Image (cartoon, rainbow, N blue to C red):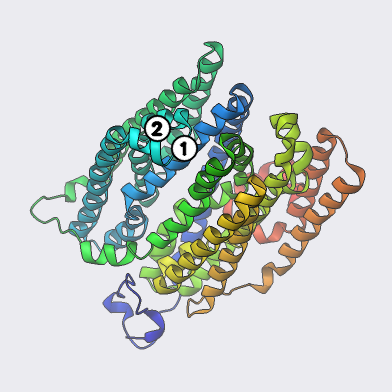
Amino acid sequence: MNPNLTDATPGALPLTPALAGGSPAPAEPGAATATRRQIRGSGLLLVGRLIAMVVNFVVQVLTVRYLSKSDYGAFAYALSIVALGETVVTMGLDRAVSRYIPIYQERDDYPRMFGTLLMVLGTILGLGVALIVGMVVLQDMVSETLISDRRAVELLVILIALSPVQALDNTLNGLFAVFSRPRAIFFRKYVLSPCLKILIVTLLILGDSGVIFLAWGYLGAGVLGVTIFSVVLWRVLREQGVLARFSRRTVRIPAREVLMFTVPLLATDLVYVIMNTVDAVLLERSGGTVDVAAFRAVQPTARLNQIVLQTFALLFTPAAARLFARNDREGINALYWQNAAWMAIISFPLFALTFSLAGPITVLLYGSRYQDSALIMAMLSLGYYFNAATGQNGLTLKVLGKLRYVVSVDIFAAVINLVVNLILIPRYGAVGAAVGTMGTMIVYNILKQAGLLFNTGIRVLDPRYLRMYLVIILGAVGLLVLEVLVNPPAVMGIVIAALMSLLVLRLNRTLLNLDTMFPELLRVPGVRWLFGA
């Protein structure tokens, strides 16, 4: 077997016999088709995500403005613990859906494919029930020892059930991505879920209700969404003939293979937990729920910089896994950098608003009482956009089986972030948490990008895309200088940011390959002019 095509780390899948010879297989014609299908499907999901972003953004702003700062801080704190609970109940097994199921299906190994699915769902349901029961039984002890705010504990008892619900939701999304149903994901995640949230917040305000009503509403919306999504998935599997391949007698649960891949990657979840939960815990202990609110109010807005990254990731992993199963490394490189270009360019308008114009945007959205959170938004935005603009480096390393390196980097980033938070949060509060998150995101992403050097076949920085990054840097810095020197009104700043975004798009238009990915858009006169087609 060619040593250049395998990895000694746990979870590296063996090559098929046809690819196990001494010379690498040539790139298949299907690689370009796979990239095009992935970009087009991701484009549909991105449109849906933009719609959902607007709705969720309205929900966020209305919630922050309606609730008192302490109530919103308690609600945000409870949601942070829910994220931790979601990590616990999945045990990292949700990754097996997007990586192993397409590979097993590609090899017609349906016994292991169904075994993987049953293993993931059984783990989530079992641990989810245990988590809910444990929280209800131990709530008094939690209130006395861990959480000083009683309202936060009350909210957590309700919202903790969202942990398994959201874990199931993510698993279902992965299954729809594997079985090529982006339209179903579009409806569930980007139409139904945002509409339910806006309905809940509307009822909250019109009924002059409190934060407890909001918590029950979020939980009900999550349960309803998963129920509808499960019914739709069952129909999809039946229509594609997948269910006909199921047999209880032949099901084989590949526990060893899956666990050797997913358990080491719990370190990735550790980074996520520390960066999204520990900061809230430390802020609540040192400054109360008001400090939590100062940080959490602007964090969702800053995290919008990752909306394209997260949307493209859903279909990227199955596409890369199929190319990996064919040993098409050049195809994976093309897929990687085409995704990176789309993510960097399309995310730039949000980065311009949340980083370069963070001051006026924060006051415009959340009012003068959150004015001090502008610096927090800017720092978080820089960290999140830096992660998005360099591409799906972490997912690619996992697909290629570079688990030892990924785990080492994950643990290093988690330790660094925890140490920085312990030093800065007690002294600088929410600003210290923002510094820790921004710095960790940048260092973490640089280390993951460097991992592409280790025999992956992917260029760390493709020269064709260097000009794109220079244009983006100059555009963002130019807007920041304009904001500092001129301090234009918020509306004028938004217009200038929009013009700068169009300039960035036009200067990098050839990298998007719009004529290949979305030729139908070129029929629109304005689009043809913008892309010089």
Relative to 459, residue 319 above or below? above
Amino acid of disc 1: Leu
The mark nearer the N terminus, 1 or 2, is 1
What's the amino acid at mark 2? Answer: Leu
Pinpoint residue 11: horizontal percent, then vertical percent: 32, 69
Give the label on residue 79, or none: 1
Looking at the rendered structure, the secondary structure element under dot 1 is helix
Which numbered circle lies on residue 517? none
Q: Which residue has dot 2 on it? A: 159
Q: How many marks?
A: 2
Q: Is residue 173 shown to the viewer in this render?
A: no
Q: Seen in the image, is 516 located left or right of residue 412?
A: right
Q: Quadrant of residue 288?
A: top right
**Side of 480 relative to 446 (left or right):** right
Graded by Cα atoms within 10 Å as few (under 14), some (14 to 19) or many (20 or more), the crowding at tag 2 reads many
Quadrant of res 437: bottom right
For residue 308, side relative to residue 363 (left or right): left
Mark 1 Cα shell of 10 Å, populated few (<14), some (14-19), many (≥20): many
State the CA–CA distance, disc 1 to disc 2: 7 Å
Q: Is residue 489 above or below residue 354?
A: above
The residue at 33%/42% (across/down) is 168
Q: Measured along the vertical axis of the image, is residue 483 above or below residue 63?
A: below
Q: Residue 101: x and y, percent?
A: 30, 57
